[in-house]
Amino acid sequence: MLLRDLLKGTDYRCISGSADTEIADLIYDSRKVTEGTAFFCIDGVITDGHSYAGDAVNKGAVALIVEHEVEVDGNVTQILVKSTRKALACMSAIYFNNPAKRLKVIGITGTKGKTSTAYMVKNIIEHSGAHCGIIGTVGAAWLDKTVTTGLTTPESYIIHELFKKMADDGCEYVVMEVSSQALKMSRTAGIQFDVALFTNFSPDHIADGEHATLEEYRQCKQMLFTQCDTGIFNMDDDTADIFIKEAGCERIVTFGMTAEADIYAHDVEKWSEKGLLGVSFDIEGLVNGNVRLELPGVFNAYNALAAISVCTVLGIDWETIKKSLPSVRVPGRVELVNVSDKFSVIIDYAHNEVSTKSVMETLKEYDPAHIICVYGGGGNRSKLRRYAMGEVTGEYGDLSVLTCDNPRNEEIESINNDIKVGLAKHNGAYVEVPDRVDAIEYAMRQAVTGDIILLLGKGHEQYQEIKGVKYHYDEREAVKEAARRYFNV
């Protein structure tokens, strides 16, 4: 495409060369520059892309998108813009022929609940008969395809590339997690979201390279609601009024467990039966009925309420919504695996003190006979995290089966010795079973009626990293194999 055409809608000045230069591709990583491409000099958290401009030209870049003029050899076009990040977002949309316009785009932001709510929305939409893509913490997925993205919200070029692939394959919707960092770095700039959802807000991501203050963190999240048609807000969150006041949406919808919300949930109850755990509740307002989830925890009632609100705004009928929710499973987020009527098996990505304590407190509310934890620790990582994991599981659990996680270049035995330091603070019972499938089978053989087997640390990951090699490993497959052995089938 001509550079001039790619720049439509972008405020720019051509300070050298010609905007009529033909562009083969848009590149923001100098290592990936090839002949005929445009290179975006992005001032990043660690390095400034302007310092790689000369290298990009030597590799064949014919245009540089810059925030200030750079000195390079040869006759290369330089386009001056206020923000190279915003320019990349807007130009990527044009480069891929504006694929967002072929999709209904749903954006979800908030401190917690983004991944679970996104999967619920996707599940409901697909039960309605439409195809829906998803972009978020566990990567991107649509139809039978999956892509590892590395970031909750990938770079703008990747977003529009994924949008195009999804639309070309027949997707009518895409639901994506929109992180505060993505909004701060203009990765979603120029996208007009059909629906934007706010889940909740609490202190997080205040650190070098993330957000300087809590106020900045909140303001970045609020940006999503300046580029959407309908904004949906959790009315029970303390900051909801601020988000709503600052929103620029044509329509505002609220949800919560207070009667003033447009979609109001009440009579939330936890239930457990035949190895399953979940919550149920009634809703009133824009829709009326009863909801039953096979996902434990009141927080999942909020996630479901958020998903119901999104899908109601999208025009999906209540019966479809209601029928789809019991089958929802969120990869690695208190993910129930049906194994036995006697005990429950739950997969969770928790791999530090805070997340482990949170999931175990949630499960304790179901009054299990025992909680058996199967987990290990990451090699070449902080020993303090291992101590903390041991301490939490020793306090809240009844038995820890110490096994393999991602030992990397450390020995499993050495990692487990660190975990034992934490376990000892509460005299936590433990055994060591190095092979993870064997460890899961062992937990099943120890379980009695009413037990919960909690598999920690792997979650949605698809590998185990051992001595520099990543081996395929899927926790769901491991549970299936352990169950096959357990039932001797």
Image (cartoon, rainbow, N blue to C red):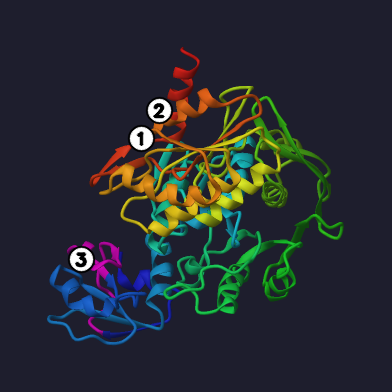
Foreground pick, 169 / 387: 387
- The residue carrying mark 3 is 36
Foreground pick, 341 / 379: 379
Q: Is residue 21 magenta?
A: yes
Foreground pick, 10 / 349: 349
Image quadrant where residue 8 sits: bottom left
- Quote the CA–CA distance across marks 2 and 1: 8 Å
Tell me which label, 3 or 2, sits earlier in the chain.
3
- The residue carrying mark 1 is 434
Up/down of 395 relative to 277, above or below: below
Q: Is residue 443 visible?
A: yes
Foreground pick, 143 / 222: 222
Graded by Cα atoms within 10 Å as few (under 14), some (14 to 19) or many (20 or more), the crowding at tag 1 reads some
Residue drawn at (37%, 62%), measured in percent from left and top? 95
- Quote the CA–CA distance across marks 3 and 2: 54 Å
Residue type pointed to by label 3: Gly
Q: Is residue 174 visible?
A: no
Query: Is residue 466 found left or right of 431 in the rendered image?
Result: left
Residue 84, x across and y down, in percent: 37, 76
Up/down of 268 relative to 75, above or below: above
Query: Is residue 77 found left or right of 166 in the rendered image?
Result: left
Q: Is residue 87 magenta?
A: no
For the residues bearing labels 2 and 1, Cβ distance under 8 angstroms: yes
Image quadrant where residue 11 sits: bottom left
**Magenta span dominant secondary structure:** loop
Q: Secondary structure at mark 3?
A: loop
Residue 124, x across and y down, in percent: 64, 40
Furthest-right residue in view?
259
Range shown magenta: 16-38
- The residue carrying mark 2 is 438
